[in-house]
Image (tube, rainbow, N blue to C red):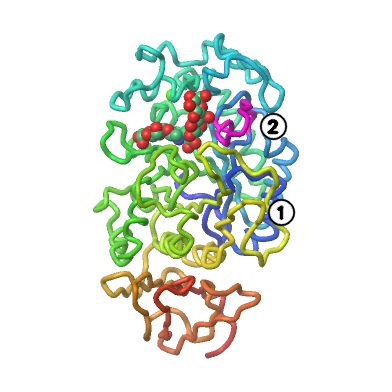
Amino acid sequence: QWRPAYAEGHDGMVHLFEWSWKSIAEECENFLGPHKFASVQVSPPNENRRVAGQWWERYQPISYNLDTRSGGRADFIDMVDRCNAVGVRIIVDAIINHMCGEDALSGTGTGGCQYNTDTLEFPCVPFSSGDFNDYRCGSQNGLINNYGDPNEVRNCRLVGLTDLDHSKSSTADKIAAYMNDLIDIGVAGFRVDAAKHMWPEETEILYGKLHDLPTGKGFPANTRPWIGQEVIDQGGEPIKKEEYVGMGAVTEFNYCFSLGNLRGSLAQLKTVADKPSNWGFLSNKDAFVFTNNHDNQRGHGGGGGGIVTFKSPHDLPYVTGMMMALPFGTKRIMSSYLFEDGDQGPPAAQPSTADPTAESCNNDWVCEHRWAGIRNIGMLGGAMRSEPDSYSNWWDNGSSQVSFSRGTGWFAVNSDAWAMEGGIQTGLAAGKYCDLAQSDLDSCDTFINVDASGMACVNIQAGQNVPMSYTIADARVGDF
Ligand code: ARE
Ligand code: CA
């Protein structure tokens, strides 16, 4: 439940926010699989309330039928099969704390199911008033007003979203049935939305009801689904991320700020690998990490200064590189669309996925995962995965030039205002390797030469487009 069941040699979860199932299936086959990304976090696949022009309608469930603007059940199943076939797992954004907002009143969801938030009827699940938490909520208006009161945070309505009661086994069974349907289809895990708003002991019972991943879909026997719980703990509130580590990984929001604030002094991040607790971080195994997410990139939750997003196009690749190379956490890369305001929904046209050499997906899809410097980072991460998980050959200049190896990969970065030049220990066997930070393996034009003692001449100029150099044992293309 802490480490996802990734294919050998793959790493990195790409959040293809608001992509359709058809486009994701194509992206798995054309790009993500060949580039050895490990998984895709998909937008919530279950039926939701319609709210014109917004992205966040997806966070307001109406039923557990797989029917949204991303596609229907058949498309979803096809996507899971096609992605699994090329070594890319599907991670579902599971909205299980609540159903739709009380302001929805009554209507029809994206799949044609009815709802009524006055009587709390969701007949397609079915849920009715007995499945909801209001009787446990002590707040005057039924909403969460005070994050200092754990009872309110868990039992009252988050921004008016009708709150499910996980203490009732009949309610929990229906939620588990939804998640088990997805597991049986071949989904490898879940990002659990608003986990902070559910009681840890009740969610643990719920996760206990989940099936193992199906051996019939190629997973090893007795593999538990990965669980990545969204718990925003930036300090200063009584609810702690540590309450949730017993049953899965947990988001490490403060790492977004560390990565952003230290982008000019990357050497300091060594201690994140050495002793994450010095930073107040969860352990390597428990942490779910990212440079930015779909909320904090648009000021919606867990925000704050210094976060690196696609709006910092020079910095995002090397910050992402550092995150992927360090032995810390299960890593997620945000893949965004352009927006002017924080509520705006996705572009009308889907991303273009056909050309694997393209670094853009056009049609206002930013496709950070295809950018130079980032596009081969799953390959690097996959080669670096190792047990026990730690680095070797660490070198830094005390400022922002860093080099180290891990598993069968080697990584170097320079975000200083002066050049990084000279001999560096890579830990690799002698040979000529493709520099995957600069070039794709099948059309390589930038190389790293490693001598018999493992040393390479590194040359990363200040301010160069992608100020990184990295490679893996499998990218050896000849003799030195
Ligand atoms: C929308 C409207 C609301 C309306 C509501 C109901 O914006 O005005 O009342 O619908 O109709 C997303 C959007 C919300 C949206 C919601 C439902 O961000 O704007 O509401 O979907 O459509 C807290 C939670 C955390 C949550 C953040 C956003 O703890 O779990 O708020 N994040 C997840 C998702 C979001 C999603 C939801 C949960 C709901 O990632 O995308 O909301 O499913 C401090 C606290 C945090 C708190 C944060 C923000 O940092 O420590 O705990 O996060 O403030 O309040
Ligand atoms: Ca709740």
List the residue tagged with mark 2: 67
In the foreground, 103 or 235: 103
Displayed quadrant of residue 262? bottom left
Secondary-structure class at tag 2: strand
Q: x, y (%) of residue 100?
A: 55, 23
Q: Amino acid at mark 1?
A: Glu
Question: From this viewpoint, which residue is outermost toward the right?
Answer: 74
Q: Is residue 117 left or right of residue 186?
A: left
Which disc is residue 26 wearing? Answer: 1
Identify the residue at image location x=56%, y=14%.
117
Identify the residue at image location x=61%, y=74%.
441
Residue 123 shown in magenta: no
Q: What is the magenta range?
A: 46-59
Confirm or deny contact between disc 1 and disc 2 (CB under 8 A). Answer: no
Residue 53 shown in magenta: yes
Identify the residue at image location x=68%, y=44%.
20
